[in-house]
Amino acid sequence: MKKKLISVLVILISYAALAQSTPEKKESKFELTVNTKLGFAKLKQTGNVALNGNINGGDILFSLPLGKTWKIASGIGYFEYNANPTIAGNTASLKNTYLHIPLQFNSDLAIFNNENTQNQKIFFNLGLGLYTNTLLKQELETITDNTSTKNMGWNFGFSSQIGLKFLLTDALNLGMGLESQSDFTKMKKDGAEQRIEQINALYFKMGFTF
């Protein structure tokens, strides 16, 4: 899987390099973005205090212009939440695996207003959106037992992003910044409820325009 992903990235970067050598510039309509994220999260489960942990994952997003200022983006993502709860006085290991489906509205704002927008290479990026998550698998490991539960429900949440976007060529850009997520509904299964109260993560993006 990693080899296939690397092959796709090499092809896309090669396309971006060829696009840079093309003298005729055309307005881009479609953008493919691959991003990774790493940060901290707080999980709230029925009958337990909020549990601090860490998350890592990534998304593949497809975006189209929405007027002159905004873009609308959606796609699919995957992330893991890892934490160490205390059960009966002993430390356990908890791992949640999520499927993430975002819907985002993004805007690239010029930093240097005295320059022509077409000549600018650095932009302030702002994003707001909604998402739905499903908990594909929850694994709990203790000193006496290991349990695994699948398909633990769906829920919805709100997300925001703030960062910088760097245009390397007409077809290739990089970005980095901070992303925040918060579930506003709970996942429910067999009388148990849970939601991620807060995610704060650092993201890195690579975008390809066509």
Image: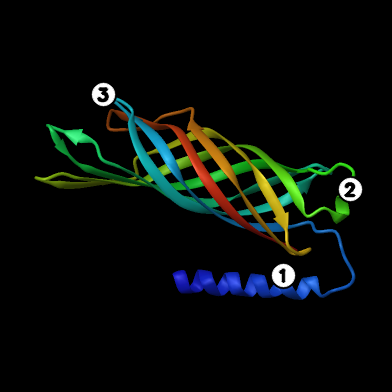
Point out the frontmost of discs 2 and 1. Answer: 2
Q: Give the residue pinned by disc 2.
A: 115
**From the viewer's perspective, is residue 174 above or below residue 54?**
below
In the shown orientation, is residue 92 left or right of residue 45? left
Compare marks 3 and 2 and give the one earlier in the sequence.
Answer: 3
Compare marks 2 and 1 and give the one earlier in the sequence.
Answer: 1
Q: Residues under labels 2 and 1: Cα distance? A: 24 Å
Q: Do the CB atoms of the residues marked 2 and 1 lie less than 8 Å apart? A: no
**Mark linked to residue 47:** 3
**Residue at figure coordinates x 45%, y 44% from the top left:** 39
Q: Do the CB atoms of the residues marked 1 and 3 lie less than 8 Å apart? A: no
User: Could you tell me residue 166's position as x and y percent?
Assistant: 71, 55
Q: Mark 3 is on which residue type?
A: Gly
Q: Quadrant of residue 111?
A: top right
The quadrant of the image that shows the N terminus is bottom left
| Local secondary structure at mark 1 | helix
